[in-house]
Image: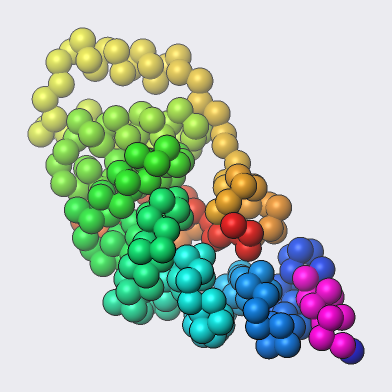
């Protein structure tokens, strides 16, 4: 089988969501055509989406050797390193990605995840607020931002983030978090404000949104992958009774 045939079959398998089968073919194709960054991206994601994060990190490093100014590859390397617990190296990779493209929304989403794992809510807040300023924060991002502010006892901002998140999320646990903020004895809230929020909770339309992946607004189902919920894991430093989103944001797509 020629290298071109390996590439074509590997990419067809990748698009069909058959990542385990696609990976060895894409590896051979990427080695034959090392200047084709798209092949490296699909190889990295094939490994990542089949749960082989350590292997995905190694492929990302090899790809960066060929494409050192690819912010996508540096970002994805950072994400894979977070998965395998190499947080210091992940921070270096994401720092490189930031120097190349500081306005990429997934950069800030991955940085927020990194700082959450590092138990650093202040920097998590900074990353998520940067994402929000880009106009790219989704319901899950805002939920995590609310949790981070709640851990810092900034309940007014936490409540606002929960409210914004609830506009596009139908998860009842999110509404529970709003109630827990109001029931917190540290929260001073005039009765008129409480009544206003109660009215909003009753009458505001709450719609379920489809998960998104990096670039072009594709739904995660297009790539055939959504990261599973991390059951039992709560954001660091938060009150145990507060609920975290049921699943982390899905991984990126291979296109930019």
Q: Nearer the viewer, residue 202 or 28?
A: 28
Instruction: Report the residue at 83% width, 74% height from top.
Output: 8
Q: Left or right: where does residue 143 sit relative to residue 239?
A: right
Q: Which residues are magenta?
A: 2-11
So how many labels did they put on this image? Answer: 0
Q: Residue 201 at what x, y percent from top left?
A: 39, 20
Figure check: 63 above or below 122: below
The residue closer to the viewer here, 87 or 168, is 87
Q: Which image quarter is the N terminus in?
A: bottom right
Q: Quadrant of residue 163?
A: top left
Q: Residue furthest top?
A: 192
In this rendered view, identify the residue nearer to me: 14 or 68.
68
Say which residue appears at 60% left-offset and 41% top-offset. 210
Secondary structure that dominates the magenta span: helix
Residue 140 screen position, x and y as percent: 44, 44
Q: Is residue 47 above or below residue 175?
A: below
Q: Is residue 28 above or below residue 166?
A: below
Residue in the picture at 10% in, 34% down: 186
Does any portion of residue 79 appear in the rendered image? no
Q: Residue at x 65, y 83 (%)?
A: 34
Q: Is residue 144 left or right of residue 153?
A: right
Residue 118 picture quarter: bottom left
Quadrant holding the C terminus = bottom right
Asked if residue 221 is among those painted magenta in the image, a careful observer would answer no
- The one nearer the camera, 21 or 186, is 21
Q: How is the image coloured?
A: rainbow
Residue 167 position within the rendered picture, expressed as x and y whole percent measured from the top left: 45, 28
Residue 6 image position (x, y, % from top left): 82, 82
Residue 8 falls inside the magenta stretch:
yes
Residue 132 seen in the current view:
yes
């Amino acid at each position: 089988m020629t290298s071109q045939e390996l590439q074509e079959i590997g990419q067809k398998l990748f698009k069909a969501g058959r990542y385990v089968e696609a990976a060895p073919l894409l590896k051979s194709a990427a080695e034959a055509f090392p200047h084709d960054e798209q092949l490296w991206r699909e190889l990295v994601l094939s490994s990542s989406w089949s749960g082989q994060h350590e292997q995905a990190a190694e492929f990302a490093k090899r790809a960066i050797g060929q494409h050192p100014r690819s912010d996508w590859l540096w970002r994805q390397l950072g994400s894979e390193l977070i998965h395998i617990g190499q947080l210091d190296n992940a921070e270096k990779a994401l720092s490189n990605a930031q120097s190349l493209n500081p306005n990429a929304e997934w950069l800030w989403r991955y940085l927020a995840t990194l700082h959450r794992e590092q138990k650093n809510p202040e920097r998590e807040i900074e990353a998520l607020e940067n994402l929000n300023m880009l106009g790219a924060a989704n319901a899950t991002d805002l939920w995590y931002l609310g949790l981070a502010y709640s851990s810092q006892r900034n309940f007014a901002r936490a409540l606002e983030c929960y409210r914004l998140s609830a506009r596009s999320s139908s998860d009842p646990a999110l509404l529970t978090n709003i109630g827990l903020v109001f029931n917190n004895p540290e929260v001073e809230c005039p009765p008129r404000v409480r009544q206003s929020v109660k009215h909003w909770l009753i009458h505001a339309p709450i719609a379920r949104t489809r998960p998104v992946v990096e670039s072009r607004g594709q739904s995660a189902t297009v790539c055939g992958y959504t990261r599973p919920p991390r059951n039992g894991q709560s954001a660091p430093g938060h009150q145990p009774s507060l609920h975290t989103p049921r699943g982390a944001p899905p991984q990126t797509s291979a296109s930019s």
